[in-house]
Image: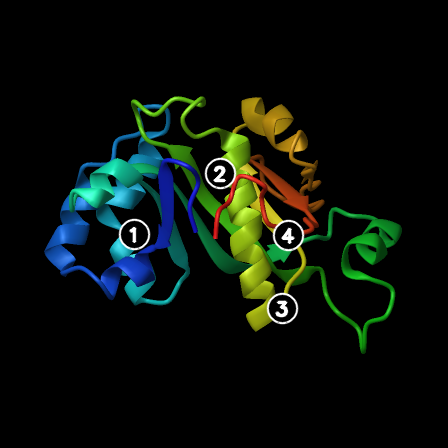
Amino acid sequence: MRLDDVLLFSLRELAARFPRKALEKMLADFSCSRDKSIESFIRNEALEFLEELYGTTYVFLDRDSWMWGRLRVMGIFTLAIAATDFSGLSKSQMKKVFGHKRRGKAGPHRGAWLLGQFARADGVSAQTLSGKEMYYCVLDVLRGLREASSGRVLVLECAPELVPVYQSYDFKVLPPPPDASPRHLVTMYAIPEPKRSPLYAA
């Protein structure tokens, strides 16, 4: 999959094509001054995250660098399955999110796709790779995952100031459980309809 100047690979795909040292260097070169926790995860935990089957990190690579045999990360996101507490939703909201027909009684914790780290690298502008383009790619990957397994809900956690950004992608704030402790991060959810981005070429 590719945008005009960007290639998208999972770390699993790259691990099958390149030695570990090359991947370690690629990830060590990633910088994200806007969110040092994302930078730390990519540099120090992404490969372990993959090897222990917690989920998969996807990287946007610069196409020109790729043609010269170099791996330059322009952006990243991770996807994993997570048990999420939806008890903050009303019964009618739960039916709308998970459907009306369910066998047996299900508790408030439901499996959902978790969109984890989601960021551009320092020095990569929104004109080169916008957040919306990146999100289209998330949806495209989700489409393939749904065909192979299941799961219709996508959740994420973000800082309060990013809530309007994700609301523009049709995410809604997930009310915290009644007994939840105060948290800095806001949990949001969406039921996206994965569709191939018009920005893609096969």
Q: Which residue is mark 1?
A: 46
Q: Which amino acid type is marked by label 1?
A: Ala
Pair 1/4: label in front? 4
Disc on res. 194: 4
Q: Secondary structure at mark 2?
A: helix
Pair 1/2: label in front? 2
Q: Earlier in the sequence, mark 2 or mark 4?
A: 2
Q: Earlier in the sequence, mark 1 or mark 2?
A: 1
Callout 2 touching callout 4 (CB < 8 Å): no
Q: Which amino acid type is marked by label 3?
A: Ser
Q: Which residue is mark 2?
A: 134
Question: Residue sitting at 74 percent across and 46 percent down?
Answer: 88
Q: In whole angstroms, how far apart are the C-alphas of marks 1 and 4?
A: 25 Å
The front one of 164 and 197 is 197
Q: Which residue is mark 3?
A: 150
Q: In whole angstroms, how far apart are the C-alphas of marks 2 and 4?
A: 13 Å
Q: Secondary structure at mark 1?
A: helix
Which quadrant of the structure image shows residue 174?
Answer: top right
Q: In whole angstroms, how far apart are the C-alphas of marks 1 and 2?
A: 18 Å
